[in-house]
Image (cartoon, grey):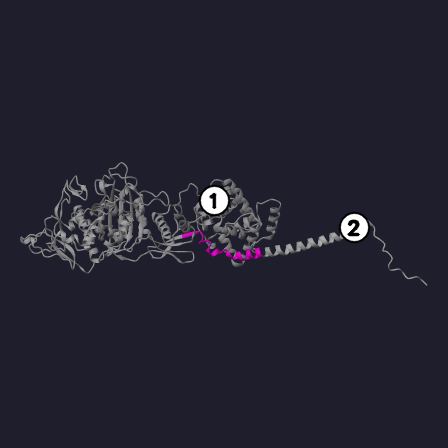
Amino acid sequence: MAKKKNSSAPKKELPVWLKAVKGFFRFFGRALVTVLSVFIISGCIIGCVLAAVVLGMVDDAEGIDLNSLELNYTSIIYTKDPDTGEYTEDTKLYGEKGKLIWADYDEMPSYLIDATVAAEDKRFWQHQGVDFTRTIYATVKFLTGNTDGGGSTITQQLIKNATGHNEVRIDRKVKEIFNALAMEKKYSKEQILEAYLNVIAFGYNTYGVQAAANMYFDKDVSELTLNECASLIAITNNPSYYEPFGHMENNSERREYVLNEMKKLGYITQEEKDNLAATPVVTSKGQTSNKKTSKYQSWFIDYVIDDVIQGLMDEYGWDKATASKELYSGGYRIYATVDNNIQSAIEEYYENPDNFPQMRNEVQPDSAFVVLNYSGEIVGIVGGKGEKEGSRLFNIASSGKRHIGSTIKPISSYALALENDLITYSTVICDEPVYKAGETYQGTTFKNDWPVNYYPGYKGNVTVDEAVQRSINTIPVKLVTMLTPRAVFDFMTQKLHITSLIDTGEVNDVGVAPMALGSLTVGVSPLELAGAYQMIGNGGLYIKPHSYTEVLDSDGAVVLKANTSPERVVSAETATILNKLCQRVTSGPYGTGTHANLSSYGIKTAGKTGSASDNTDLWFVGMTPEYLGVVWLGYSEGMQEIKYNTYPTPIIWKGVMQKIVPYMNANAEFPESPNVVQKTYCTRSGDIATDACTSTATGWYKKDNIPGNCTECYGGFGDWGDNGWGNWGNGNSGGSSDDIIHIG
């Protein structure tokens, strides 16, 4: 019988080396599991982060809007077609992208499209926004240290141009891929190509094929030949190296490459490729273009740009730099007031120095001109003589502040005196010195009789009609003295909105000389002077002069709207009488502005001349029933006397307006108040004439302020008072100066 095995017998021990091996593998296994766990957990975390990033990229992919891409670069100024009255595109303003003019896909020649695809993205029509074969190849190059790119499709290049993101980084590239895929789902291939060809750079700060076609070939994009298209597409690879003006040889080599790629894709034959490659491309460099795109923008376009920028600053509190950037790159639509027929007429006159009367000065003076209609719209403006030599030049018509001389009289002393019934059309006032030599007034001792007239001496008793015709100085001085300079100043600043008058400081404009004779501290611009004169031609209303009616943003929302609300500044009766008086300046026997008369064309003309002290600034403000024009003549730098034989500004005014006559209505009339009546008056007394009056004339009067019948011609005497200032008050004899001082 066999013996049982003893279970308590000691186990046989393993060799030491085996124990070591076993322990190593046990430790290694545990370590491996730990490491794998860490990798798995880290991978999950990284995967979650990447997923979040990718999802964010997918969300961002919807943010590029090709429909607004054009608007994001180009603001457009629209002007009215004078024949149809419809707004048409006039001028495009280029933003940070420089000269960019948008061209529609349908305007582009088919071979321009073919050249683009052949040179930039051969599988464009097949892929969905990303060419993965090229992408993988470009990625391998990137990982091996080659960062010259080459994997982007046209869609991806468009995204880089639209966003401005072109850093060589993996995260940007991944985001670009998702953007491209999203874009191709949202837009057609044609839309993508149109956008791409409108934003790519062509050198010389020019973007888009339309602007490039204009610059390099003086053509519209639709007129380009196949060879010219290949030449343009050749530029895009490296504009500074391939632009044809300075690097024609480089451009020709790259053009041949483009043509060869077109041949490979079957767009052209081998024979066509060889013939085109051997044919030189002729650029427009050195040629004189007749196209509008080659000219400097007009004086009006200069001004409307400044006007809109100022409007944006006022409306939104922006500084000038911000407002300018918004205008040039905000895709605004600006509806301008210019009449291009009138603008062209003024420019044509001003570009030819021979049109101007020659002064006796060695250097001929400069000049400026502005035309408004009576709705306050600026329909034409020129800021200087001669051909325009740049854009955004200083515009004297809108920005120059000059001494306005006697042109102040109708809009200051005469306007307020008529409005307050201090005078009538025919009131007689004595032309005499207001202050004699040696007299002192408010601390000033006069060395000579003051004021003086442009003619020697004084005329004695004159009617208001004659005083306006002759531009007599003494009469407005008397009127302003009675009205008070402060009342006149407030009228001109608060009602006529002249912004450059000053009422503070030791030297200011709240005085008799500034308010009566236009001897101003700073001066007034021709444009603001035109605005003030509106009331004389439109029945007593002020409407702020404006160069645009409204400005819309890229979504069609109104950004700016001109204030076209009329403000009554004098009564219709006062405006009618003022207008009749100003018509006498151009048609009366003593009128200083008779050279401006347009009666030979059947057009009524009113106006007023003006000269600053020492003839440093000469003016004429002229009005027809439809338009108001202001001409200034002087030296833009410093003060210099203008020496003339015949007073020149009415001549210049008529020369310009003759060119505008074809666009006027010869049957138009100035508005007349029904409360103004026509009467015959005695030129000796200024009262309504009787059968005894031997010298009479026609005047116009408010129905409630008609002078009495003349008694002087019966042998009686009017009450001239002891101051020698004439027949004041409501037109009836007997009004004293004390009665008038307290009126107004």
Query: 63 or 18, which is in the foreground?
Result: 18
Residue 58, position in %: x, y? Answer: 55, 57
Query: Toward the viewer: 106 or 36?
Result: 36
The answer to whether marks 1 and 2 mark residues whose Cβ atoms lie closer than 8 Å is: no
Magenta run includes residue 58: yes
Seen as rendered, the residue at the extreme right is: 1
Q: Quadrant of residue 147?
A: top right
Q: Which mark is residue 21?
A: 2
Q: Where is residue 206 in the image (x, y as percent from the top left)?
A: 45, 46
Residue 402 placement (x, y as % from top left): 27, 44
Query: Which residue occupies the foreground of this view, 303 or 422?
Result: 422
Q: Residues within 10 Å of mark 1 (few under 14, many from 20)?
A: some
Q: What element carries label 2?
A: helix
Is residue 306 located in the magenta-colored stretch of the structure? Answer: no
Count of labels shown? 2
Name the residue type under label 1: Gly
Residue at the extreme bottom of the image, as rendered: 1
Residue type indicated by callout 2: Val
Secondary structure at badge 1 equals loop
Q: Name the residue under label 1.
A: 203
In this rendering, would 563 be left or right of 733?
Answer: right
- Whether residue 396 is visible to the viewer of this picture, yes or no, is yes
Q: Main secondary structure of the magenta part?
A: helix
Residue range in magenta is 52-75
Residue 597 visible here: no
Residue at the image position 28 percent from the left and 37 percent from the top: 363
